[in-house]
Image (cartoon, rainbow, N blue to C red):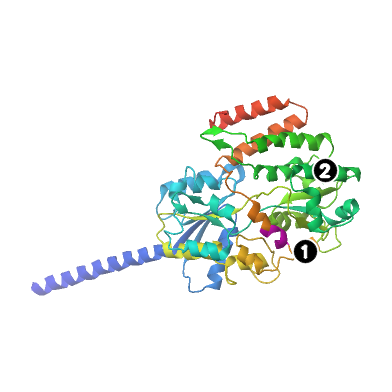
């Protein structure tokens, strides 16, 4: 009987031990998974590349990609953060249009500070020379919770051949003095271009991105809708462009706008306001060619804009409740703060993340850009970093709100109603304020 009891006890112990080991194995397996949420495949591809470059990084990456089309990404991300659990995001991305919601707004409580992850933030920020506007956007009262990898400070991107025809030179150091500093100089340039039969920009949206992100205050101040004087002045800038024939009256992201990039509209457009990503991912593919001499490819240059601004960008955050903190910290540091020649940003700046010959881009680290080659055939061999490094210094991140995506589209629609002659200036502004109140319950000031 005693022998039988010992046998049963032994079996039970083995069973218990087996269950324990099995549960431990499951827990360990769970620890080897990193959930990544994004609105494009850009950040997930970076992380997969990190795994390829670091075989010892033995984590499974589970990716959820939901496009921002029709506003689908944010509600899904919010539910995932609120729900928590094994499927909650460990790393998640947010773009400029709504990043403040996750860094300083309604969902800021879900973000871990980089310091809490164990990242030596102060030292690495200094070493990498990160553009201050990206730090401002990614910080709250608890500290830094998000950074990007791109620098999206804007420059003025212009046609060399048109510059030579109007001013006798295409030198960026000269052209920047023709279009700025300040919008008075910009409109003087518009008149000079008009006399030669050119538009200074394709549409009013090209100027809007510069005006929007150079304003002193954002759309919401003390819980009320605020129309910054610089943003309000855009309605007059837009009317001036329209009434004087200074643009082609296109809307950004439409076929007519793309046509101006290849010089296909009857009146040639001189330039566009934008960051490096506009050159690399939009203009180059719509230039009508793939090498110098084809379409407008190679007929472009960049100079400092008349007003400093930034446009777009992606910030990377970590969930405060992540169970894989060290691994998440390793990835985020590599993407956002590693300024070495084996960091993501060096590969990104030089177009070598997936091998030689990739697309070069302006990055968040000034240190990286100072030791990288930003020359592009598209720009006639110009090193774009010469313009985009100072552009990052001029940009400010203190005028964003979590409502920008909605309010911007409402404002721009009402401005176009005014410039088209469908409404008075006062009526367009009044309708804008009413629509914002109805949509977001934000009273005007």
Residue under pointer 2: 188
**Label 2's element?**
helix
Which span is picked out in magenta?
384-389
The circle on residue 190 is none
Q: Which quadrant would the N terminus be assigned to in this image?
A: bottom left
Residue 294 position within the rendered picture, expressed as x and y whole percent measured from the top left: 85, 60
Residue at 73 percent across and 25 percent down: it is 424
Residue 148 position within the rendered picture, expressed as x and y whole percent measured from the top left: 57, 57
Locate residue 151: give its quadrant: bottom right
Residue 361 position within the rendered picture, expressed as x and y whole percent measured from the top left: 67, 61
Residue under pointer 1: 382
Look at the image and say whether residue 353 sits in the magenta stretch.
no
Would you say residue 202 is visible in this rendering? no
- Vertical relation: 418 (above or below) 100: above
Mark 1 residue crowding within 10 angstroms, few (<14) / some (14–19) / many (20+): some
- Vertical relation: 415 (above or below) 262: above
Residue at 69 percent across and 67 percent down: it is 358
Does residue 330 appear to the left or right of 248 in the view shown?
Answer: left
Does residue 211 appear to the left or right of 382 in the view shown?
Answer: left
Residue 144 position within the rendered picture, expressed as x and y whole percent measured from the top left: 48, 54
User: Which residue is farthest left?
Assistant: 1
Residue at 61 percent across and 66 percent down: it is 367
Q: Nearer the viewer, residue 152 or 416?
A: 152
- Judge depth for marks 1 and 2 and give the one in front: 2
């Amino acid at each position: 009987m005693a022998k039988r009891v010992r046998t049963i006890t032994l079996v039970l112990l083995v069973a218990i031990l087996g269950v324990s080991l099995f549960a431990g194995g499951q827990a360990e397996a769970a620890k080897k998974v990193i959930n990544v949420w994004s609105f494009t495949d850009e950040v997930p591809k970076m992380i997969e590349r990190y795994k390829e470059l670091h075989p010892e990084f033995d984590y499974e990456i589970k990716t959820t990609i939901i496009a921002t089309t029709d506003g689908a990404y944010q509600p899904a991300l919010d539910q995932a953060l609120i729900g928590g659990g094994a499927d909650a995001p460990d790393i998640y991305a947010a773009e400029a249009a709504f990043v403040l919601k996750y860094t300083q707004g309604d969902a800021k409580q879900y973000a871990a500070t980089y310091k809490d992850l164990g990242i030596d933030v102060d030292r690495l920020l200094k070493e990498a020379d990160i553009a201050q506007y990206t730090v401002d956007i990614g910080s709250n009262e608890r500290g830094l919770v998000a950074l990007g990898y791109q620098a999206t400070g804007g420059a003025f991107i212009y046609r060399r051949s048109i510059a030579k025809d109007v001013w006798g030179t295409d030198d960026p150091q000269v052209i920047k003095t023709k279009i700025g500093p300040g919008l008075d100089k910009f409109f003087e340039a518009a008149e000079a271009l008009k006399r030669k039969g050119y538009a200074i920009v394709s549409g009013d949206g090209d100027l809007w991105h510069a005006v929007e992100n150079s304003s002193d205050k954002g759309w919401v101040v003390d819980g009320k809708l605020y129309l910054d004087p610089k943003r309000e002045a855009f309605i007059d800038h837009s009317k001036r462009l329209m009434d004087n024939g200074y643009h082609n009256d296109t809307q950004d992201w439409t076929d007519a706008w793309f046509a101006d990039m290849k010089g296909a509209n009857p009146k040639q457009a001189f330039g566009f306001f934008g960051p490096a990503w506009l050159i690399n991912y939009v203009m180059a593919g719509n230039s009508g060619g793939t090498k110098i001499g084809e379409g407008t490819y190679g007929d472009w240059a960049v100079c400092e804009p008349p007003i400093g601004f930034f446009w777009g960008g992606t910030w990377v955050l970590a969930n405060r409740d992540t169970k894989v903190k060290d691994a998440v910290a390793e990835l985020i540091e590599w993407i956002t703060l590693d300024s070495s020649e084996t960091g993501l940003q060096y590969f990104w700046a030089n177009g070598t993340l997936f091998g030689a010959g990739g697309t070069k881009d302006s990055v968040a680290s000034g240190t990286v850009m100072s030791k990288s080659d930003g020359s592009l055939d598209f720009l006639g061999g110009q090193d774009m970093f010469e313009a985009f490094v100072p552009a990052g210094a001029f940009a400010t991140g203190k005028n964003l709100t979590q409502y920008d995506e909605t309010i911007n589209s409402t404002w721009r629609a009402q401005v176009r109603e005014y410039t088209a002659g469908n409404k008075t200036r006062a009526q367009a502004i009044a309708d804008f304020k009413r629509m914002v109140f109805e949509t977001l319950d934000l009273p005007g000031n």
